[in-house]
Amino acid sequence: MKYLVTGGAGFVGSHLIESLLAENHEVVCLDNFSTGKETNIEGFKENITIINGDIRDPNKVRVALKDVEAVYHLAAQISVARSVREPIFDASVNIEGIINLLESILTSDINRLIFVSTGGAIYGEPLQIPATEITEEKPISPYGISKLTSEIYLQWYHKIHGISYSIIRPANIYGPRQDPLGEAGVISIFLGNIYSNQPVTIYGDGTDTRDYIFVKDIANICMKAMESSYCNTYNAGTGIETNLLDLVKVIEEATGQKAEKEFKPPRPGDVKHIALDSSKALDDFKWKPQNDLLSGVRTTWKWFLSTQKS
Ligand SMILES: NC(=O)c1ccc[n+]([C@@H]2O[C@H](COP(=O)([O-])OP(=O)(O)OC[C@H]3O[C@@H](n4cnc5c(N)ncnc54)[C@H](O)[C@@H]3O)[C@@H](O)[C@H]2O)c1
């Protein structure tokens, strides 16, 4: 198969491309390298077609879709904090981006689209945790709102134009290649802090919980969703809530180093508690996470150290 991966030079997209290449698929990567990096794809960039362009640019998207059979859509503004500061920018990339992509798909031979949404930000503060796909979506950040809006557009294009799709709602993804200097990805940020002997910053009192899922598990569910013909929405998490204080302990165990903690007030837009029930993905795709938090953080730390030496 020949796939387009939007946002393929990013953290998750680069792992997805690697997994697709391992299964001998052809890949086109559309990315504007705003947060994506050359280094993320340097191990395999000769084996893919790279188009440097914006997901909102109809001409670039049309070129990227040429001869492609199906699309993984990951290009996005991903920071909750930035979405709070710049909601217009967030909506432009995330909502205008997917509409532009879907409009171009209408004039192509594309037969399926997998959209990577968010499970961490779409439910807001659910009454019951882990949240299932029928938990009411009540996002409390512009990022959560733009992802939910994108999902609704996608469902509209499915209903009116018959585009086949599945939506993946991942929990908090972590792993090699996540930017330690970025605004999202607390595990990479903390690993970067520890490496440079800086305190780790905890917003709130450290009791906020998240569901941490390893990046390879997300690449895997995206591919399983593509192979299926279900048009549906799937959570992708472990179902396990880990609070920030316990996360720091796991990081200390994985790195063998002590972390100094610095506490700051909670940030607007951040949810207090979330974890995802992914039993629907288990039923439909036979998917379940293969990596536990400690081993995933160890792998990420090893990768982080290797980048500091080079
Ligand atoms: N990292 C997480 O914890 C997490 C959790 C849930 C969902 N997601 C979703 O997974 C997807 C990938 O996120 P990531 O963590 O790899 O982030 P990332 O920032 O590393 O990847 C996003 C990619 O999209 C590209 N991009 C951004 N704006 C673009 C534009 N206008 N045109 C073309 N390309 C553009 C960036 O350059 C980058 O390569 C996103 O859709 C994100 O919302 C991430």
Image (tube, grey):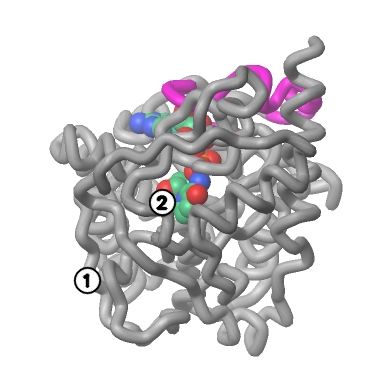
At numbered mark 2, what does the secondary structure look like: helix, strand or loop? helix
In the rendered image, the vertical position of residue 40 relative to residue 28, given as above or below: above
| Quadrant in the picture for residue 178 | top right
Q: Can residue 160 be seen at all in this image of the molecule?
A: no
Q: Quick one: quadrant of the C terminus? A: top right
Q: Badge 1 is on which residue?
A: 138
In the rendered image, the vertical position of residue 141 relative to residue 189, given as above or below: below
In the rendered image, the vertical position of residue 108 relative to residue 213, given as above or below: above
| Quadrant in the picture for residue 139 | bottom left
Side of 99 relative to 250 (left or right): left
Magenta span: 28-48
* Disc on res. 105: 2
Instruction: Indicate the position of residue 213 as horizontal and vertical percent values.
Output: 62, 59
Instruction: Indicate the position of residue 242 as horizontal and vertical percent values.
Output: 54, 64
Amino acid type at circle 1 is Lys
Residue at 70% across / 43% down in the picture?
252
**Magenta residue check for 39:** yes
Instruction: Indicate the position of residue 256 as horizontal and vertical percent values.
Output: 79, 38
